[in-house]
Structure formats: C-alpha cells, structure tokens
Amino acid sequence: MGRSYVIGEYSEKYLKKLKAEERYGTTGILLGQITPVKTYIAFAARTPLKDHAELPPENPNEMNANDIEWVSEHARQVSRMLPGGILVLGVFLIRPPKMTKEEAHDIFRKLATAVEVAVAKERLWNFTEEEPAERVVLQIYADSKSMKVRAYDLHNPQTPIKMLDCKPSSLTAPWQIMEATINVDVNIPVPVAAEHKFDKDSLKGLNSWAKQIMQSSYLINGQFKDPENLIGEGSKKKLPVEVQFLTAPVPIADGEVDALIEDCGSSVTVKGTVRCRAYLHGSKSKVKDAIQSLKRDVLNTVFIRCQMVFEDQILNKNVDGDSSSLKAPHRVFASVLPSGVAFCDYGFSDEGNKELEEHFKELLDYELNPAQLDRTEEVMLEEMGTEGIQDLLKKPEEQEITEAGFKYKDTQEPPSAQPQQPVEPEEEKELERSTDEMAPSFDMTFAASCSDTSAERILEATVELARGVAAAAGVGVIAVAVSVIYFGNFIGESA
C-alpha cells in the first residue's frame, strides 16, 4: 500500500482563491507534516512579488537563476517560522494556459531542488533513511478546476515526476502538542582564520551539541515510554505533553578521533534556557516520532537565533563586536490554523506586534490579528529585563514577586567563596510551581578564550555577578553571567 496525500481545507481554499484572481504564474511553498504513511498539506503561501510588482511574471517558464533564488530564499525564511513537526513539503504553481507539460516539469525540478537546498542550510539535523525522500509539487490549471499533485524524488532528481492521489480534508481537529524546556551550555571556538567573529562558519561548533541532543534520553510527563508506543495512549483528550531530555556525553567508538586542534582567538558560548514546541497530527503518532520532532525544534530554535544575531551584526557593520552582550530575538507563536497549529516568528527587543504582523503578511500571505500572538513563552522575562531583575536581587530585604509567575526570596548577601546551600524539598517544589510559565529571552556575549599572547583579545568586559535563580517550566537553572550567549534573562549564582 502506497503513501496517501491529504490537502487541508485552508490550503485548498487559498489555492483556489489565487486561481480565481487569475494570478497565473504564481509560485509558492507548501507546508505540512510527513508521517510514515501520510503526508498532510496544511498550509500554502505564495512567493512575495519582486520589486513590489502587482502581478507575477507572464512567462514563468522563462524563470532565470535570480527568480529561482528568490523562491528558495522565501522558503528558507519561512522555514524559520515553523515549529517541530512542520516542514516545507514542496512548491506549487498556478499554471498559465500556454505552458506545456514539459515546461512545467522542468520548472518544478528547478524549484523543488533549490528550495530543499536552501531549507537544508537552516538545519543542524538530517533526515533518516526511513523518512520519505519525496517532496510535493502541486499545480493548478488555468482552464480547469482540478489541482494535480505530484511527487518529486530528492535523491533522484531526474526520475519522472509521478502523479499522486490527493484527498481533501478539513484538518481542523486538534493536533498533539509536545513541549520541552532545554538548558543550553555550549562553547564554540572562533578560529583565528575566521574573517570576523560573526562568521557563520563559527556556528559549525554547534554540531557536537546537536549530536548530543539527538542522542539524549527522554521522560514524557515524568515517565519513560517505549519508543514504539502511541504518544496519546491511555488518554482520550490530546493534552499538551511535557518532555524532559536527559543528555550525556556522546560516546566515541573505538578507533574514532573526536578531537580537533585549531588556532583560536576567541570563543562564543551559548548558555541559557529555551522553550520548544512540536505538533503531531492524528492519534497514531508514535513516541519516537514525537520525540524526534521535538528534538529537531530544539536544534532549529537555537541555530536560528544565533544566525539572526550574526546577520544583524553584519548588517549593521558591527563585525568587530562593540558590545560584550548582544540581545538575541525572542520567539513569539501565533495560531494560524483552526486546528490550533501555531507558527512562530523571532523579534528583537525593538520590534513590536506591528513588525510581526508585517512578517506574517509578507512571508505567509496571512493577515494576523494581534490577539493571535502568544507571548506567554518568553514575554515575562523580556518585560522585566535582566537589569531590572538584578536590581531587585541587590536589595538585602526579602523579595517576593508573584504576579509575573516568579517567586524568589533572599535574606542574605551572596557569599563569595562558600558552597551553595542545598534547597529544601518543600522550598524547591514551591519554586517549581511558581515558575511554570517562565521562559527566558536570549542574550549573546563574546569573550577572548585563548591564552596565546599573539591572539587578539576581542573584548575585555567587566562582569557583575548576582545571586539568584532562574527557571522555566519547573526546571531550575543556575548560571554565572560571564561572557556568553544567553538564551535567557539570567539571574546568576556567584560561584
């Protein structure tokens, strides 16, 4: 029995709307989920027009390299907005009346290949051999009401594009939500040969950490579940599932060498806490598939935020790093489908709802209502700010903040060289309960890490140490604020 393909109600109506407007030649991307037996097309978004053009090109069969790059760049940016479990499935085309079958197939091959290459650059992970290598190409004919869906083999681009039977479905039933909080602490050496400290090649240093995450163990709602079990087994309702990942050093096989000697002049440290989310359709999703989707979202959100900070600094020509601390964007979700599936966007501190609405309109062709934005994941600490929290901690009297969901008491000055006092079980439980809704924003700093006197010191920053605790979703975090990339407003514990 072959795979079946399902197109959601939103995607079907959207594509028919584009055809009714006679936007022939319009290209775009398809978003959805690939399961072992089905592919769900849940969302479609047209490619933004170039140079503020009002209509797509009349002859898309004459698309040049710049046009194809424009489509693939759109797909790359949209891929940043997707939670775990949702992928760029392929491309669509509103086929002009005079376009031949051969011309259409040639365009689809070029677009599908370019889109997949561009999206792959945003990933720290690879597809498994068991996952289908097919991507969807969909065309809407100008002279009929039909939509033809075909499969394109990524591994064999020259093989014929085969016709698929695609069935419509509402896809409005709630999807299973998987959530997790991850503590990140990764040191990335920056080679002396790097053009500047914001060289994207430096982010390759995240690969070993990514491998550690993908090989980590897990607990689902505090318990271990067999990978082959159904994720919703024993539950009648699709309640959000909380996952805890348990990491350990990646084992090295006999004969393997996992060391690299390289001249470095500085380092980037990624440290903090991130909140992650994945969606799964249907009631037969296995634990192993759900965990894999969530782990991939962990890697995506860390990598994307680092990339955006680098890009922002290069764009502002601040490649020499004038600041020891660079604030990275926070993640904001917005439900865009009746099923509750939410896409996300990343906004810097100077970007508000208006900028997010513009991003959704430009990239997803979606009119976003401000009420759809969900800032609960990170907004609390973003509003308080690191400096504000540290000021609170400097007060010797007891501090108690309960309205924002964070509760902390301190009645003594932080010791400079004493071991940390153990937290009593009841006090620890109280702290966890009061911090369930807390998820941090994300800061970035750089520090010289080599003792070689010939290595240029990037920055010399005076760092204030403050005493306290930060937590997200009941997971406590102790951190020292010393020249790092922060995934969070941290309240550091002096060591």
Image (cartoon, helix red, strand yellow):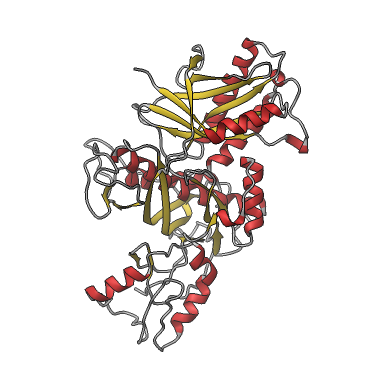
Residue drawn at x 22%, y 45% as measured from the top left: 225
Q: Is residue 122 left or right of residue 92?
A: left
Q: Position of residue 47 (x, y in %)?
A: 65, 34
Image position of 129 with respect to 278: above or below: above
User: The C terminus appears in which quarter of the rendering?
Assistant: bottom left
Can residue 282 be seen here? yes
Query: Is residue 322 positioned above or below 428 on the image?
Result: above
Q: Is residue 197 above or below residue 55?
A: below
For this rendering, which residue is in front, 84 or 403? 403
Q: Residue at x 27, y 39 (%)?
A: 230
In which quadrant is the N terminus drawn? top left
Tell me the quarter of the picture where residue 433 sits. Answer: bottom left
Provide residue 54's location: percent of width, then percent of height: 78, 34
* Number of numbered discs overlaid on the protein picture: 0
Which residue is situated farthest in the bottom direction here?
Answer: 397
The residue closer to the viewer here, 101 or 12, is: 12
Asked where in the image residue 430 lies, by quadrant, the reply is bottom left
Is residue 173 depicted above or below 169 in this figure?
Answer: below
Residue at left 24%, top 45%?
A: 234
Q: Position of residue 261 (x, y in %)?
A: 38, 45
Q: Is residue 431 shown left or right of residue 17?
A: left
In this rendering, does residue 69 appear at all? Answer: no
Q: For this rendering, which residue is in front, 248 or 280?
A: 280
Task: Give percent across and percent down for residue 377.
Answer: 46, 59
> In the rendered image, which quarter is residue 289 located in?
top left
